[in-house]
Amino acid sequence: MSVDAAQLWTLNHRLLTVVLDACSTELAELGLETKEFFVLAEVTASPYPAELAATLMIPKASVTVYVRNLVAKGFMRREIDDADLRRHRLVLTAEGEAARDRALSALATEFDRRLARIAPRDRTELQRILLALLEPAQ
């Protein structure tokens, strides 16, 4: 029997949506919207707004709005980049790191609750498969 790629994509998307939805209360308690969380979670690895937009695959204008909100909430700040004084680098504040860590913990707990339904060897295989799917096309 062939596997329908669209169905697999849909199932994966549904799983991610269900996990995020299950964590929405914790995110709200932290003062985070879902997309703000993704920005907060990625900013250390991608500290420049344009780079952040490319990494998260969201419009630059949206990143600007999320960054503005996160700065206003005290979760991050803009700093002038010493290497290029025309650029701003985004940096998490201590409050931002704490909020990110709590949100990641909530997501991990919820996802782990679902992963507990499958055998450890299947979890390892799932990790291998996901990593393979994330490798650049050759």
Image (cartoon, grey):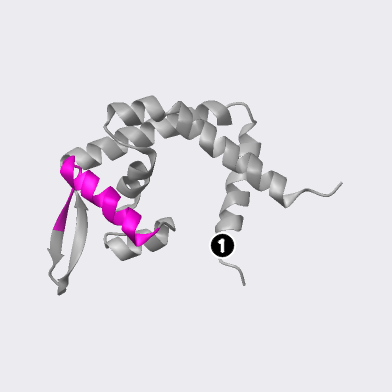
Q: Which residue is mark 1?
A: 135
Q: Position of residue 53 (x, y in %)?
A: 37, 60
Residue closest to the far right: 1
Q: Is residue 101 above or below residue 56?
A: above
Quadrant position of residue 51? bottom left
On screen, residue 136 versus residue 84, left or right, reads right
The x and y percentages for residue 116 are 57, 27
- Residue 33 position (above or below residue 91): above
Quadrant of residue 80 in the image?
bottom left
Q: In the picture provided, is 80 more to the left or to the right than 10?
A: left
Residue at the spot x=41%, y=60% of the render?
A: 55
Q: Residue at x 55, y 57 (%)?
A: 134
Q: Please give the name of the residue rendered at 76% of the width and 49% of the height, measured from the top-left corner.
A: 4
Residue at image location 16% in from the left, 56% down from the top: 78
Label 1 element class: loop
| Dominant SS type (magenta) | helix
Residue 54 at x, y = what percent?
A: 40, 63
Residue 138 visible within the image: yes
Residue 73 is covered by the magenta coloring: yes
Q: Amino acid at mark 1?
A: Glu
Image: magenta residue range: 59-78
Q: Quadrant of residue 138?
A: bottom right
